[in-house]
Amino acid sequence: MGELSGWFEKVRGVLDVPIFDLGGKPFTLWALVYIVILVVALFYVVGKIRVWMAEHALARTRLDVGARQAVATITRYVLLLLGLLIILQTAGINLTTLNVLAGAVGIGVGFGLQNIVSNFFSGLIIMFERPIKIGDRIVVDNVEGTVVEIGARSTVVLSNDNINIIVPNSKFITENVVNWKYNDASVRFKIPVGVAYGSDVRKVEKILLEVAKSEEEVLEDPPPVVRFMEFGESSLNLELRAWSTSAIDRKGRLISALNFAIYDKFREHGVEIPFPQRDLHIRSGVVEVKNVGG
């Protein structure tokens, strides 16, 4: 027992060796080990609390998934801040002695960490104002997909190719963002159609409406409509406009299905789909034709 006690005394003697002075007080190796262990434990416990809040405690409320994640994430930041302050105080560090260090960090932020700070505060703005939420279909900076995670620095967007794209949060504050589900999940799709001159456009209109109404993902209200857009160079240009709520995440599938159905119906009813044509007029002169074959 005496040997074990002596061994502990030696370890404690090593840990009590001062590393440097902080505000006139020695900062020991023991204080460093204490802070590291508690900080790791703090991050682990707070992470568990965040998951519990988002998936269990707040799941019983009327908040949607995005709101639950936002509240849980903000709570995590608050707990981390409070926990770090308590750990530093209990480790014997007077926070007033860190003013110089805070000033140095401020200079570093001003010169080298602008993007990190910008993304962090942009993340807080996103969580409070909620211009985008988890589950929203968005387009930003040529990136299109579904929001699956909103973090402190970045947001994860899942594309239709099952690729996770990490977008800095500042993009959602400084760039134009298209949110397909911001207020209403109903979206209007436009399918341009060209038919040959001489076609019965009223008949074409009827065919396009029949095609739209036969598609399950097209809404009955608002009803689909057909617009005669213009007299083109080689075709009469119309546009089928149809609404859907279920095809936002896979609008390419809906447009493709409608195009296939339109093509089949046009063939069935003898409606001609034109191709570009040009008339060549020779005003004067002689065109010489030579046989260059062997």
Image: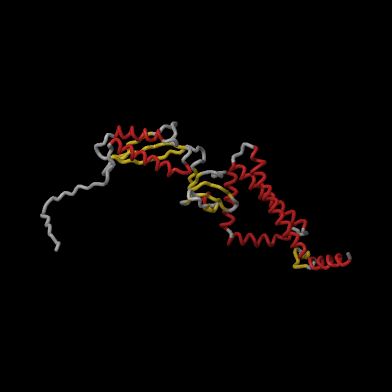
Quarter of the picture holding the C terminus = bottom left
Residue in view at x 84 percent, y 67 percent: 7
Tell how many labels.
Answer: 0
Residue 191 vs residue 1, the one in the foreground: 1
Residue 11 placement, left or right of 170 = right
Q: Can residue 234 be seen?
A: yes
Return the residue found at the far left: 286
Quadrant containing the N terminus is: bottom right
Horizontal and vertical percent position of residue 241: 39, 37
Estimate the x, y position of residue 164 in percent, counting from the top left: 52, 52
Give above or below for 254 relative to 287: above
Image position of 255 with respect to 22: above or below: above
- Quadrant of residue 288 within the rendered picture: bottom left
* Residue in front for this viewpoint, 106 or 210: 210
Q: Position of residue 53 (x, y in %)?
A: 66, 44
Asked if residue 231 shows in the view, the reply is no
Q: Residue at x 74, y 55 (%)?
A: 87
Left or right: where 191 falls relative to 163: left
Nearest the viewer among 66 and 105 is 66
Q: Residue 13: where, in percent of width, then height?
A: 82, 67
Q: Is residue 232 above or below residue 120?
A: above
- Which residue is painted at 24% across and 37% down in the image? 198
| Left or right for 206, reference 181 | left
Colouring rule applied to residues: secondary structure
Looking at this view, is 264 or 148 the one in front?
Answer: 264
